[in-house]
Image (cartoon, rainbow, N blue to C red):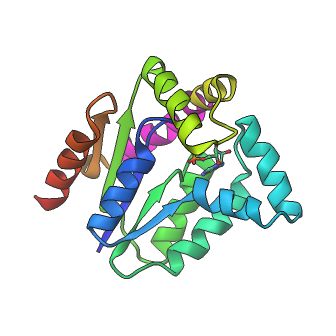
């Protein structure tokens, strides 16, 4: 069983690593960004609300995210899960910690990819052309990056202090394949 939390600001390569690692180890890839984007497709009241929030670069409410993740984690694939994009706030972290404790689920690895804003800008401009995401433009990306530093960085610090022995950081400027190798090496030793 491998349960993983992956952190990183927008454009750090978090989604790319999450896809590679979850497929390599046959674990569920729980991307809250992807789950919310598919919610938007339903175009109901909640979907429209979520669309506005995501496109403006803000965070969707903790209550919505906590209930989405609780349902997914409790129905997970038996090999484990990789959380990509959650928890993003301390509130979500406390909820997750309690949920895991209550259901006797352990986190095995916490990975955090760090990267400078200069590199992110270049990557996001490229990604916006390839994927056409409305939240991939410079104003919104700067807001999302600052929000990450202000909010999610505190979450990384919380887990780093709480779970020192399973917490690992990577430099997001590094090649994708190098970061993957480093992650796999940690998971296989
Ligand atoms: P991502 O694909 O992870 O970059 O997420 C895209 C957007 O979805 C974010 O900018 C937020 O608006 C929203 N989102 C994803 N995960 C969360 C979360 N855990 N808490 C709040 N909002 C989220």
Residue 65 position (above or below residue 118): below
- The C terminus: image quadrant: bottom left
Left or right of 87, for residue 172: left
- Residue at screen point 30% across, 38% down: 169
- Residue at screen point 89% across, 62% down: 45
In this picture, which residue range is highlighted in magenta? 147-162
Q: Is residue 158 rendered magenta in the image?
A: yes
Q: Position of residue 94 (x, y in %)?
A: 56, 55
Left or right of 165, for residue 115: right
Query: Looking at this rendering, what residue extends furthest in the left direction?
Result: 189
* Badge count: 0
- Residue at screen point 62% across, 34% down: 136
Residue 41: quadrant of the picture? bottom right
Query: Looking at this rendering, what residue extends furthest in the top direction?
Result: 118
Residue 64: quadrant of the picture? bottom right
Residue 116 position (above or below residue 105): above
Q: Is residue 121 rendered magenta in the image?
A: no
Q: Position of residue 49 (x, y in %)?
A: 84, 53
User: Which of these two is toward me, 28 or 150?
Assistant: 28
Residue 99 position (above or below residue 183): below
Q: Give the dominant element type of the magenta stretch: helix, strand or loop.
A: helix
Q: Position of residue 141 (x, y in %)?
A: 62, 29
Query: Looking at this rendering, what residue extends furthest in the front direction?
Result: 129
- The N terminus: image quadrant: bottom left
User: Which of these two is toward me, 120 or 149?
Assistant: 120
- Residue at screen point 72% across, 59% down: 63
User: Which of these two is toward me, 125 or 81?
Assistant: 125
């Amino acid at each position: 069983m491998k349960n993983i939390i992956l952190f990183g600001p927008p454009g750090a390569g978090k989604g790319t690593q999450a896809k590679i690692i979850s497929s390599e180890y046959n674990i569920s890839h729980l991307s809250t960004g992807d789950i919310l984007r598919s919610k938007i497709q339903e175009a109901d009241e909640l979907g429209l609300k979520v669309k506005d929030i995501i496109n403006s670069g803000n965070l969707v409410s903790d209550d919505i995210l906590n209930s989405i993740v609780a349902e997914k984690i409790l129905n997970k694939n038996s090999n484990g899960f990789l959380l990509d994009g959650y928890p993003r706030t301390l509130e979500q972290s406390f909820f997750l910690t309690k949920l895991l404790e209550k259901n006797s689920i352990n986190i095995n690895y916490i990975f955090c990819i760090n990267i400078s804003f200069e590199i992110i800008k270049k990557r996001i401009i490229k990604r916006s052309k390839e994927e056409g995401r409305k939240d991939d433009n410079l104003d919104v990306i700067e807001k999302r990056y600052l929000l990450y530093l202000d909010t999610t960085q505190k979450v990384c610090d919380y887990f780093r202090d709480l779970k020192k022995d399973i917490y690992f950081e990577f430099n997001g400027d590094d090649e994708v394949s190098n970061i993957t190798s480093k992650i796999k090496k940690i998971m296989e030793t």
